[in-house]
């Protein structure tokens, strides 16, 4: 039987693509898109939708009851750069929202919850390359603090109440539907829009900054695969390391320039550089591969070609 799903943060970078994917898998009426305000993206408004503030526990409970929800993807969150600009708000949105969703879920018959952690859970003392699953988690951003505390809370709800909470440490995500907002890896999305629109881009990170990244189709695949895996294949209820490829800002610019002749990138690092410098450059995801069979499909060249093709098509049709 198809699950009854609620997705918070549905109009965000992941939600805007996860909602249509889940609707195609489980049926339109079985996936409720929860948004903070009325969305402009029609991809989530073609099925059930609810305006929901996850900071309001009573409202979360009411939504779970109204739609008889048994599975929650709780995506609503503030990203790293925005979180550093307003750490109090980052704590409130990321932690109060998660606690409300977990507590409402366990008391209202929800059986499964997905929650996104991030490479931001690691700090400067973790090994920079091939960062292992159990590397120290000592982040220096409020975003990272909420990711570590969030992972522990998810694990606690599993250990104490048996709630099946599953969790991935996403790398930077590159996507063509909804723009990310307030992240440190956002440059790797913006660069494509500017390549297609103006042929030049000013990057807010240094040219030699290397970060772990992933194309959205792989992130969706990992999310669904993790949630559909039989329980014995998911022994871990803290975040799973997840990886596809890593590149420097300069390497991405060169790859884009192969398909956009004359593309020019200049570098003007800002406060986001410090965040990027505190994160790993590549991730060891062997536990995800071993436990539930994770394997990415996109490498850098294939992702770049697909992103440019999609954005060019949209620009021809309705403008990017
Ligand atoms: C961010 O840059 O804040 C996010 C992340 C890596 O978690 N994209």
Image (cartoon, helix red, strand yellow):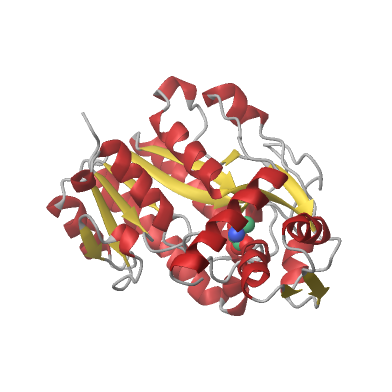
Tell me where residue 166 sits by quadrant.
top left
Q: Return the x and y of residue 206 as percentages of the image width and height.
A: 83, 68
Outermost residue to the right: 208
Q: Is residue 230 left or right of residue 148?
A: left
Q: Return the x and y of residue 153 as percentages of the image width and height.
A: 46, 48
Q: Return the x and y of residue 243 as percentages of the image width and height.
A: 66, 40
Looking at the rendered structure, the number of numbered marks drawn on it comes to: 0
Outermost residue to the front: 316
Q: Is residue 32 left or right of residue 180?
A: left
Ligand 1 is found in which quarter of the picture? Answer: bottom right
Tell me where residue 192 sits by quadrant.
bottom right
**Viewer-nearest residue: 141 or 299:** 299
Q: Quarter holding the N terminus? A: top left
Task: Write the residue at 71% across / 46% down.
Answer: 301
**Viewer-nearest residue: 27 or 54:** 27
Is residue 184 in view from this perspective?
yes
Outermost residue to the left: 66
Is residue 111 in view from this perspective?
no
**Viewer-nearest residue: 29 or 257:** 257
Task: Write the residue at 57% across / 74% down.
Answer: 82
In the figure, 291 relative to 302: above or below?
above
Q: Is residue 181 left or right of residue 107?
A: right
Task: Write the residue at 84% across / 65% down.
Answer: 207
Task: Write the residue at 41% across / 24% down.
Answer: 231
């Amino acid at each position: 039987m198809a699950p009854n799903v609620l997705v918070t943060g549905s109009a965000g970078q992941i939600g805007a693509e996860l909602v249509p994917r889940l609707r195609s898998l489980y049926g339109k009426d079985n996936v409720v898109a929860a948004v903070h305000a009325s969305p402009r993206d029609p991809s989530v408004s073609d099925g059930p939708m609810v305006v929901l503030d996850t900071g309001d526990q009573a409202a979360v409970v009411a939504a779970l009851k109204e739609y008889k929800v048994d599975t929650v993807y709780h995506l609503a969150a503030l990203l790293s750069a925005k979180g550093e600009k307003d750490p109090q708000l980052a704590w409130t949105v990321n932690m109060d929202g998660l606690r409300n969703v977990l507590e409402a879920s366990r008391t209202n018959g929800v059986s499964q919850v997905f929650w996104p952690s991030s490479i931001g859970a690691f700090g400067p003392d973790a090994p920079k390359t091939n960062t292992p699953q159990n590397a120290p988690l000592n982040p220096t951003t409020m975003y990272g603090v909420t990711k570590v505390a969030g992972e522990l809370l998810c694990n606690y709800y599993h250990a104490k109440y048996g709630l099946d909470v599953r969790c991935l440490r996403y790398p930077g995500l590159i996507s063509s539907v909804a723009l990310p907002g307030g992240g440190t890896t956002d440059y790797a999305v913006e660069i494509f829009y500017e390549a297609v629109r103006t042929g030049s881009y000013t990057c807010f990170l240094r040219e030699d900054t290397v970060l772990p990244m992933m194309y959205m189709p792989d992130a969706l695949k990992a999310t669904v695969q993790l949630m559909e895996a039989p329980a014995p294949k998911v022994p871990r209820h803290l975040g799973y390391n997840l990886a596809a490829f890593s590149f420097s800002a300069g390497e991405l610019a060169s790859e884009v320039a192969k398909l956009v002749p004359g593309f020019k990138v200049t570098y003007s690092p800002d406060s986001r550089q410090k965040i990027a410098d505190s994160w790993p450059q590549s991730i060891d995801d062997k536990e995800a591969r071993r436990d539930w069979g994770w394997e990415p499909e996109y490498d850098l060249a294939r992702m770049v070609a697909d992103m440019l093709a999609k954005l060019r098509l949209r620009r021809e049709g309705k403008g990017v």
